[in-house]
Image: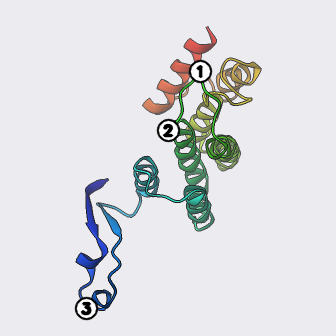
Amino acid sequence: RIARITRTVSTELDVDGTCGLSSSRWPVIIIEVYSVSCFSEAMETLHLEGQLRPNELLSKVEEWIASSPLEHEAERYYLAGVLLAKASRSSHSKASKLPPEQQVFLEKAQKLLAQSFEVSRLAGDLDLAAQALLSKVQIPGGSSGAEGAEGRKAFDLLKTHFGEGRGFSQRTKELVKELAEELG
């Protein structure tokens, strides 16, 4: 969780006085977090605040995934996919065409969520697999949107492969309900 976000300038952080020799100052944002496991929240905040250079979000996400321990790989794919899906929607209206950077985020989000589905399904984490698949088909504007055959396939797969009576998490149940409403 994010504890506090503070805006300051570089000279205020210069404890040894070495930057005082230069007259240049730059803005600095300090994000204090409670845990080291909130990468996606911190990156989302930085992206929404416009504090990341073009393509920096994508490169940081790829680094984060690459550094994942094997046992957390599916979850990182999922969280990264959700983050990039949010980022693809952050600065455009539904009526307008996606800017190139957001289109890249959208496509990468779909790939990451598909990878999360496959890795978690193979690892036996059916709850995460269901969440990844449902999140993937709900990405607006993608070729696998919930309104198409891919959405129906996802819903049918969840019902047959994972079982209707299976005890999924509340988040998964909410995603299933949203998809069912979209599909009619």
What amino acid is found at the position of numbered circle 1 in the picture? Answer: Glu
Residue of label 3: 16
Picture quadrant where residue 135 is located: top right
Closer to the eye: label 3 or 1: 3
Residue 136 drawn above or below residue 116: above
Residue of label 2: 90
What amino acid is found at the position of numbered circle 3 in the picture? Answer: Asp
Name the mark on residue 146: none
Residue of label 1: 164
Relative placement, left or right, of 146 versus 153 is left
Closer to the eye: label 1 or 2: 2
Q: CA distance from mark 3 to mark 1?
A: 63 Å
Residue located 47% across and 25% down the image: 174
The crowd level at tag 1 (other Cα within 10 Å; few <14, some 14-19, many 20+) is: few
Picture quarter with the C terminus: top right
Earlier in the chain: of badge 2 and badge 3, it is 3
Task: Kindly state the secondary structure of the residue where label 3 is placed.
Answer: loop
Q: CA distance from mark 1 to mark 2?
A: 34 Å
What amino acid is found at the position of numbered circle 2 in the picture? Answer: Ser
Residue, far top: 184
